[in-house]
Amino acid sequence: MEMASSPRTVEEIFKDYCSRRAGVVRALTYDVDELYGLCDPDKENLCLYGHSNESWEVTLPAEEVPPELPEPALGINFARDGMNRRDWLSLVAVHTDSWLISVAFYLGARLNRNESGVWKILICSNSVKEDWSEFINKRRKRLFSMINDLPTVFEEVTERKPIKDKLSVDSGSKSRASTKRSSDGHIKSIPKLAHEGYEDEEDEHSETLCGSCGGNYNADEFWIACDICERWFHGKCVKITTAKAENIEQYKCPSCSMKRGRQ
């Protein structure tokens, strides 16, 4: 992986991180079909690279050892057909997050006195050395804080609604509604306002996870709760539609149904 000029300041490193992140997020969302096609399991070990010009590339790892920069996860194509598409994308996203952090902190480890004009002249007194060490540590902490303020690639890829779908939503609509199933077996509708009510509703259910895929709650999708274990599920994960749920007096998830069968 070539790099025209090594970022030397916290701001430059963060900009490099954001650019590479934008590239891989695009690969795993907007260009996902192209990415999926390129990751042929019959090919050699392939890596997903994000470049500093916000582009992405699936290719073989660098030949030189050690490489100029840390390398992404090797062989992402081999796992493609061994799991469902969503799980594979999530796996690639997690490894990509790890790679982006490793590149940023590889560059951060090389922060030097050119990072600030204050330190252009090296003075060898112990007090200045200690001040310099503290200065660099603060800059590295700032770099991490800036990175940590952004959603991870994994969060972008497993978002409750794909990015490209979000952009197509009519922002002018006054309200939308989603349905969830209560523990007493009745379907209830949760109003979702386009403005302040939207954020409140999202916060309230943000920690609800699907008992099947582990995905976060999304008010735009149909969810159903098991009346036995009281866990929530995406309707699509347990193959239950809103229409079908209307005719179910007591819903039992696949896991609870299997337990009852064994008993």
Image (cartoon, helix red, strand yellow):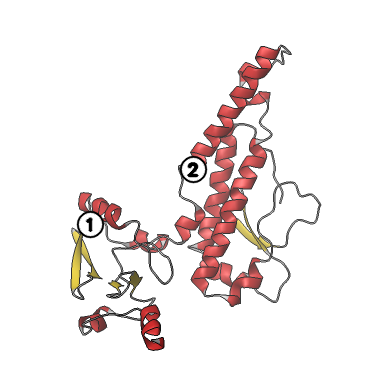
Residue 246 falls in image quadrant: bottom left
**Left or right of 248 in this view: 2:** right
Residue 74 falls in image quadrant: bottom right
Q: Which mark is residue 20?
A: none
Q: Which residue is mark 2?
A: 148
Callout 1 amino acid:
Gly
Question: How far across and down, in percent of the image, does residue 147 sit?
Answer: 51, 42
147 to 37, vertically: above or below? above
Callout 2 amino acid:
Asn
- Dot 2: element: helix
Q: Which residue is mark 1?
A: 172
Q: Residue at x 59, y 46 (%)?
A: 101
- Dot 1: element: loop
Question: How far across and down, in percent of the image, does residue 32 sit?
Answer: 52, 67
* Residue nearest the viewer, comparing 217 with 227: 227
116 to 89, vertically: above or below? above
**Left or right of 263 in this view: 225:** left
213 to 120, vertically: above or below? below
